[in-house]
Amino acid sequence: MTHVSIIGSGNMGQAISAIVAKGGNTVELFNSTDKDKAVTGEVVILATPYPAYEQVLADRADQLAGKVVVDISNPLNFETFDSLTVPADGSAAAELAAKLPDSKVVKAFNTNFAATVASGNVGELPTTVLIAGDDADAKALLAGIVSAGGLRAVDAGSLKRARELEAVGFLQLTLAVGEKTPWTGGFGLA
Protein backbone atom coordinates (compact mmCIF):
# COMPACT_ATOMS: atom_id res chain seq x y z
CA MET A 1 0.00 0.00 0.00
CA THR A 2 1.26 3.45 -0.94
CA HIS A 3 0.40 6.70 0.80
CA VAL A 4 -0.43 9.47 -1.69
CA SER A 5 -0.73 13.20 -1.02
CA ILE A 6 -2.69 15.28 -3.52
CA ILE A 7 -2.20 19.03 -3.49
CA GLY A 8 -5.33 20.49 -5.04
CA SER A 9 -8.91 19.57 -4.21
CA GLY A 10 -10.59 20.54 -7.48
CA ASN A 11 -12.18 18.16 -9.98
CA MET A 12 -8.93 16.43 -10.92
CA GLY A 13 -7.70 16.18 -7.34
CA GLN A 14 -10.96 14.60 -6.25
CA ALA A 15 -11.13 12.21 -9.22
CA ILE A 16 -7.54 11.05 -8.71
CA SER A 17 -8.12 10.74 -4.96
CA ALA A 18 -11.03 8.36 -5.61
CA ILE A 19 -8.89 6.22 -7.94
CA VAL A 20 -6.06 6.06 -5.39
CA ALA A 21 -8.48 4.97 -2.64
CA LYS A 22 -10.27 2.51 -4.94
CA GLY A 23 -6.94 0.76 -5.48
CA GLY A 24 -6.49 0.20 -1.75
CA ASN A 25 -3.92 2.96 -1.24
CA THR A 26 -4.21 5.72 1.33
CA VAL A 27 -4.70 9.29 0.22
CA GLU A 28 -4.74 12.76 1.75
CA LEU A 29 -6.17 15.71 -0.16
CA PHE A 30 -4.83 19.22 0.46
CA ASN A 31 -6.60 22.44 -0.45
CA SER A 32 -5.25 26.00 -0.46
CA THR A 33 -5.98 26.46 3.25
CA ASP A 34 -3.83 23.47 4.30
CA LYS A 35 -0.47 25.26 3.98
CA ASP A 36 0.57 24.35 7.53
CA LYS A 37 -0.31 20.66 7.17
CA ALA A 38 2.74 18.54 6.29
CA VAL A 39 2.80 16.46 3.11
CA THR A 40 3.44 12.87 4.17
CA GLY A 41 2.80 10.82 1.03
CA GLU A 42 5.48 8.82 -0.75
CA VAL A 43 3.83 10.06 -3.92
CA VAL A 44 2.73 13.69 -4.19
CA ILE A 45 0.36 14.67 -7.00
CA LEU A 46 0.26 18.36 -7.91
CA ALA A 47 -3.37 18.82 -8.95
CA THR A 48 -3.29 22.59 -9.25
CA PRO A 49 -3.09 24.82 -12.31
CA TYR A 50 0.47 25.34 -13.50
CA PRO A 51 0.59 29.01 -12.39
CA ALA A 52 -0.01 27.83 -8.79
CA TYR A 53 3.14 25.68 -8.81
CA GLU A 54 5.29 28.66 -7.83
CA GLN A 55 3.38 29.08 -4.56
CA VAL A 56 3.24 25.32 -3.94
CA LEU A 57 7.03 25.15 -4.27
CA ALA A 58 7.52 28.22 -2.08
CA ASP A 59 5.40 26.56 0.62
CA ARG A 60 6.48 22.92 0.24
CA ALA A 61 9.64 22.34 -1.82
CA ASP A 62 11.51 20.94 1.19
CA GLN A 63 8.64 18.49 1.87
CA LEU A 64 8.87 17.12 -1.69
CA ALA A 65 12.51 16.02 -1.46
CA GLY A 66 12.90 12.27 -1.89
CA LYS A 67 9.31 11.83 -3.07
CA VAL A 68 7.74 10.92 -6.39
CA VAL A 69 6.14 14.18 -7.58
CA VAL A 70 3.47 13.88 -10.26
CA ASP A 71 2.89 16.88 -12.52
CA ILE A 72 -0.62 16.79 -14.02
CA SER A 73 -0.55 20.35 -15.38
CA ASN A 74 -1.07 21.72 -18.83
CA PRO A 75 0.85 25.03 -18.87
CA LEU A 76 -1.75 27.02 -20.81
CA ASN A 77 -1.94 30.71 -21.40
CA PHE A 78 -5.24 31.07 -19.53
CA GLU A 79 -5.78 34.62 -20.83
CA THR A 80 -5.80 33.72 -24.52
CA PHE A 81 -6.16 29.93 -24.38
CA ASP A 82 -4.13 29.79 -27.60
CA SER A 83 -0.65 28.66 -26.51
CA LEU A 84 1.45 26.91 -23.93
CA THR A 85 3.54 29.08 -21.61
CA VAL A 86 6.71 26.97 -21.70
CA PRO A 87 9.33 26.95 -24.47
CA ALA A 88 8.54 24.66 -27.43
CA ASP A 89 11.53 22.45 -26.61
CA GLY A 90 10.61 22.21 -22.92
CA SER A 91 7.75 21.33 -20.62
CA ALA A 92 6.23 22.24 -17.29
CA ALA A 93 7.45 18.87 -16.01
CA ALA A 94 11.05 19.62 -17.03
CA GLU A 95 10.85 23.02 -15.32
CA LEU A 96 9.44 21.36 -12.20
CA ALA A 97 12.18 18.71 -12.21
CA ALA A 98 14.85 21.43 -12.42
CA LYS A 99 13.32 23.11 -9.34
CA LEU A 100 13.06 19.81 -7.44
CA PRO A 101 16.41 18.08 -8.03
CA ASP A 102 15.92 15.79 -5.01
CA SER A 103 12.51 14.55 -6.19
CA LYS A 104 11.52 12.04 -8.86
CA VAL A 105 9.25 14.03 -11.18
CA VAL A 106 6.82 12.25 -13.50
CA LYS A 107 4.22 13.61 -15.88
CA ALA A 108 0.79 11.97 -15.84
CA PHE A 109 -2.97 12.63 -15.94
CA ASN A 110 -2.60 15.81 -18.04
CA THR A 111 -4.18 14.13 -21.07
CA ASN A 112 -7.22 13.05 -19.03
CA PHE A 113 -10.32 14.96 -18.01
CA ALA A 114 -11.63 14.50 -14.47
CA ALA A 115 -14.82 12.88 -15.78
CA THR A 116 -12.88 10.17 -17.64
CA VAL A 117 -10.68 9.49 -14.60
CA ALA A 118 -13.81 9.17 -12.44
CA SER A 119 -15.76 7.01 -14.89
CA GLY A 120 -12.82 4.85 -15.94
CA ASN A 121 -13.59 5.18 -19.62
CA VAL A 122 -13.37 7.43 -22.66
CA GLY A 123 -16.35 6.40 -24.75
CA GLU A 124 -16.08 2.63 -25.04
CA LEU A 125 -12.33 2.61 -24.28
CA PRO A 126 -10.76 2.32 -20.83
CA THR A 127 -9.23 5.53 -19.51
CA THR A 128 -5.50 5.43 -20.17
CA VAL A 129 -3.06 7.44 -18.08
CA LEU A 130 0.13 8.20 -19.99
CA ILE A 131 3.18 8.41 -17.72
CA ALA A 132 6.53 10.01 -18.63
CA GLY A 133 9.58 10.20 -16.41
CA ASP A 134 13.24 9.41 -16.06
CA ASP A 135 13.01 7.17 -12.99
CA ALA A 136 11.72 3.68 -13.83
CA ASP A 137 10.79 2.88 -10.23
CA ALA A 138 8.79 6.10 -9.87
CA LYS A 139 6.88 5.38 -13.08
CA ALA A 140 6.23 1.79 -12.01
CA LEU A 141 4.96 2.93 -8.59
CA LEU A 142 2.53 5.39 -10.19
CA ALA A 143 1.47 2.84 -12.82
CA GLY A 144 0.67 0.39 -10.02
CA ILE A 145 -1.49 2.98 -8.24
CA VAL A 146 -3.30 3.82 -11.49
CA SER A 147 -3.86 0.16 -12.43
CA ALA A 148 -5.01 -0.82 -8.93
CA GLY A 149 -7.61 1.95 -9.19
CA GLY A 150 -9.04 0.44 -12.38
CA LEU A 151 -7.44 2.65 -15.03
CA ARG A 152 -4.94 1.65 -17.68
CA ALA A 153 -1.35 2.95 -17.31
CA VAL A 154 1.04 3.28 -20.25
CA ASP A 155 4.71 4.22 -20.00
CA ALA A 156 5.13 7.09 -22.47
CA GLY A 157 8.93 7.23 -22.13
CA SER A 158 11.38 9.64 -20.57
CA LEU A 159 10.53 13.01 -19.07
CA LYS A 160 11.41 14.52 -22.47
CA ARG A 161 8.06 13.14 -23.68
CA ALA A 162 6.26 15.48 -21.29
CA ARG A 163 6.32 18.21 -23.95
CA GLU A 164 4.34 16.00 -26.33
CA LEU A 165 1.94 15.02 -23.55
CA GLU A 166 1.42 18.70 -22.78
CA ALA A 167 0.74 19.41 -26.46
CA VAL A 168 -1.85 16.61 -26.56
CA GLY A 169 -3.41 17.90 -23.33
CA PHE A 170 -3.53 21.42 -24.76
CA LEU A 171 -5.21 20.20 -27.95
CA GLN A 172 -7.78 18.20 -26.01
CA LEU A 173 -8.56 21.18 -23.75
CA THR A 174 -9.01 23.56 -26.67
CA LEU A 175 -11.34 21.08 -28.36
CA ALA A 176 -13.45 20.82 -25.21
CA VAL A 177 -13.51 24.59 -24.65
CA GLY A 178 -14.58 24.99 -28.30
CA GLU A 179 -17.32 22.42 -27.68
CA LYS A 180 -15.93 20.07 -30.32
CA THR A 181 -15.61 17.27 -27.77
CA PRO A 182 -17.37 16.87 -24.42
CA TRP A 183 -15.60 17.16 -21.05
CA THR A 184 -16.73 13.56 -20.53
CA GLY A 185 -14.81 12.45 -23.63
CA GLY A 186 -11.34 12.95 -24.94
CA PHE A 187 -8.56 10.95 -26.49
CA GLY A 188 -8.40 7.22 -25.89
CA LEU A 189 -5.87 4.51 -26.68
CA ALA A 190 -7.17 1.41 -28.43
Image: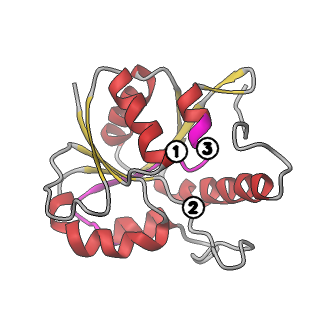
Residue highlighted by disc 2: 74
Q: Residue 109 bears which disc, if any?
A: 1
Screen quadrant of the N terminus: top left
Select label 2 or label 3 by which is in front. Answer: 3
Residue 126 seen by the camera: yes
Residue 77 in percent (x, y) is at 63, 75
Q: State which region is magenta.
A: 99-115
The reply, left or right, for residue 173 in relation to residue 14 is right
Tell me which amino acid carries mark 1. Phe
Q: Amino acid at mark 3?
A: Phe
Tags 3 and 1 touching, CB below 8 Å:
no
Disc 3 versus disc 1: nearer the observer: 3
Q: Residue at x 56, y 54 (%)?
A: 161
Look at the numbered disc 2 and give the secondary structure of its residue: loop
Residue 111 within the magenta-colored segment of the rendering: yes
Q: Residues within 10 Å of mark 3 (few under 14, many from 20)?
A: many
Q: Does 63 appear in magenta?
A: no
Is the residue 189 above or below the residue 49 in the image? above
On the rendered image, what quadrant is the C terminus found in?
top right
Q: Which mark is residue 113?
A: 3
From this viewpoint, which residue is outermost toward the right?
180
Q: Does residue 14 lie above or below 150 as drawn?
A: below
Name the element at disc 1: loop
User: Is there any visible trace of residue 108 in the rendered image?
Assistant: no
